[in-house]
Amino acid sequence: MNEYIKLAWRNIWRNKRRTIITAASIFFAIFFALIMRGFQLGSYSNMINNAVKLYSGHIQVHATGYSDNKSINNTLKVNDELMDVLKSNENIKQIVPRLESFALGSSGPKTKGVLVMGIAPRKQNEMSNLSGKIIEGQYLKPGDQAVILGKKLSQYLELGVNDTIVLLSQGYHGTTAAGKYQVKGIVEIPKPDLDNKIVYLPLSASQQMYYAFDRLTTLSINLNDHEELKNTVNQLESSLSADKYEVKSWREIMPELVQQIESDNAGGWLMLLILYIIILFGVFGTVMMMVAERKREFGVMIAVGMHKFKLSIIVTLEMLFIGFLGLLAGIIGSMPLIYYFHINPVRLTGELASSMESFGIEPVMPLAWEIGYYGNQTIIVAVIVIVAVLYPIYSITRIKAVKAIRG
């Protein structure tokens, strides 16, 4: 077998041009497959990160029944038992407390229904980098009696920094919830439906306004490894009493986003299938050219006593070597480009950007930096190369030595 390997390796360099052309077809195959799939997976990560970091977190813990009846009365009180379970889970990275409810926001003659989100300013900022999205004014501090408004909401209510907003709602157990707060900052959220109604208030101020002291609607959780989402949800559900708490993943909280990703992924695989078909014909055409050029060579080798089976082994090894070189070059060649656009995503403008923002997605196109899809695309292209190898094997078994030598 070692002799076959040596002979195959020497053969591919006897005609460097043919080897380079064949390897180049495989190089471009894996290169474009990786770039295309990288953009697809990167766009999904961008969609998920926007939703997870800005609002839901990977997992949310509520009082039992809250997801069906989002009432300020259906809140939970944090205790040591609950926090011990959450903090003992190694995959939990952040725990962000919130008190969420709706209210009427008023400024002069303008009134609008708003989502009041009581947040722990430092923890919320660690999760979503909210301070980095402030376009006017300053970020909140824990003791502030002030608010941050979404940009679109501030425009509708005609409010600026240092102006005053009045909030009116129903508090805990039917009390009247009302407050008058200074606008400390304006934040631009890349999720229009949220930007159009969000009011951020320090957690202590929101608990005071709703008379829900020491109570929360949500514990929003971020994970170290989002791939372990299902396992972490199962662990928390088994550790927490179902009578007191419910555990929901972002996939349950935002089913419309899951459907959107699955639908787009199906279309993406269809595009990849078309690309793979083009790749198959490209590689197959290159292999046919190689066989046609070497037909006389194969005839001579058979005529001098080389068994067709052994010749098939050598040619198969040649194609595998060329395929390996093309795959390796494609992977190495694509890595710098994928990594660069992973760190520096393409920022979209114009109508396409507006369209993405209307779906609540930040208008950027990063490339995914994941080992998994490198392996998947490499395997698929390797299978294409192996399928293409069947043609020269078939051709060798059909060769008539005399006819091949005469051309």
Image (cartoon, grey):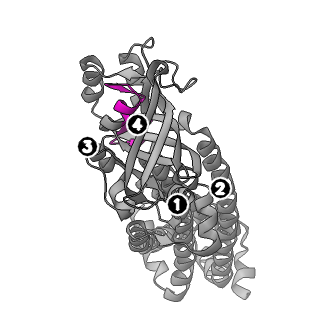
What span is in magenta? 206-229
Q: Real-space Cα distance between discs 3 and 2? A: 47 Å
| Label 1: how many Cα within 10 Å (few below 14, some 14–19, many 20+) | few
The residue singled out by tag 2 in the image is 269
What residue sits 43% from the left and 22% below the top? 75
Query: Where does the image place residue 194, in percent across and percent down from the top left?
Result: 53, 50
Distance Cα–Cα, label 4 vs label 2: 24 Å
Which label is found at residue 158?
1
Q: Earlier in the sequence, mark 3 or mark 4?
A: 3
Res 96 visible: no
Q: CA distance from mark 4 to mark 1?
A: 44 Å
Q: Nearer the viewer, mark 4 or mark 1?
A: 1
Q: Which residue is mark 3?
A: 142
Cα distance between the residues tagged 3 and 1? 26 Å
* Label 2 crowd bin: few (<14), some (14–19), many (20+), radius 10 Å: few
Q: Earlier in the sequence, mark 4 or mark 2?
A: 4
Q: In this rendering, would 98 be left or right of 259?
A: left
Q: Mark 2 falls on what kind of element? A: helix
Q: Earlier in the sequence, mark 3 or mark 2?
A: 3
Q: Earlier in the sequence, mark 4 or mark 1?
A: 1
The CA distance from mark 1 to mark 2 is 46 Å
Position in image of residue 375 (x %, y %): 46, 55
Q: Position of residue 128 (x, y in %)?
A: 37, 51
Q: Earlier in the sequence, mark 3 or mark 1?
A: 3
User: Which labelled disc corresponds to residue 228?
Assistant: 4
For residue 289, side relative to residue 154 (left or right):
right
